[in-house]
Image: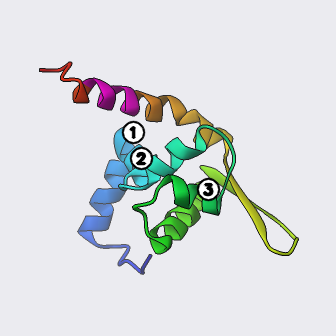
Amino acid sequence: MGIFKTSSTIQENKQFALDQCPVTHLMEKIGSYWKPIILWQLSSGDKRYSELKRAIPAITEKMLIQHLKQLEADNLLIRESRPVVPPFVTYRLTKAGEGLLPVIHAMAEWSFKDKEGAFK
């Protein structure tokens, strides 16, 4: 990402919010446009990179790679590479990633209801 001045007021406020607010902690992990979509795709099982790219055609390769690395660093998915030619890489959810599935499914359920006009 980048180097941040650790003593800045903004960083102190951000750290305070992370420590005090569980929603802030969650949004730090999945708070981007693409991460919940990637998690949704992996909710049905292991996927190869090409399967994820096909399932999310609007995402650029750069963004998909970047978010997969971030989700792996946050221990939400596992990247498994097999030493064969051509390379065979699969992605799957960790226990922590699986723990987010009720949240992801609740988001999807809310979206379906909102599209149907259930909240009007």
Image coords of residue 77 (percent x, y): 63, 51
Does 119 sit left or right of 47 as displayed?
A: left
Q: Read off the residue under disc 3.
A: 51
Q: In this rendering, is residue 62 above or below 56?
A: below
Q: Residue flagged by tag 1: what amino acid is it?
A: Pro
Local secondary structure at mark 1: helix
Q: Read off the residue under disc 2.
A: 25
The colour scheme used to paint the residues is rainbow
Q: CA distance from mark 2 to mark 1?
A: 5 Å
- Disc number for residue 22: 1
Q: CA distance from mark 1 to mark 3?
A: 32 Å
- Is residue 108 on the magenta stretch? yes
Local secondary structure at mark 2: helix
Who's the residue at 53% across and 34% down the image? 101
- Which span is picked out in magenta? 107-113
- Is residue 37 on the magenta stretch? no
Who's the residue at 39% across and 39% down the image? 22
Q: Determine crowd level at label 3: few under 14, some 14-19, many 20+ residues with C-alpha closer than 10 A.
A: few
Image coords of residue 3 (percent x, y): 42, 81
Image coords of residue 4 (percent x, y): 37, 77
Q: CA distance from mark 2 to mark 3?
A: 29 Å
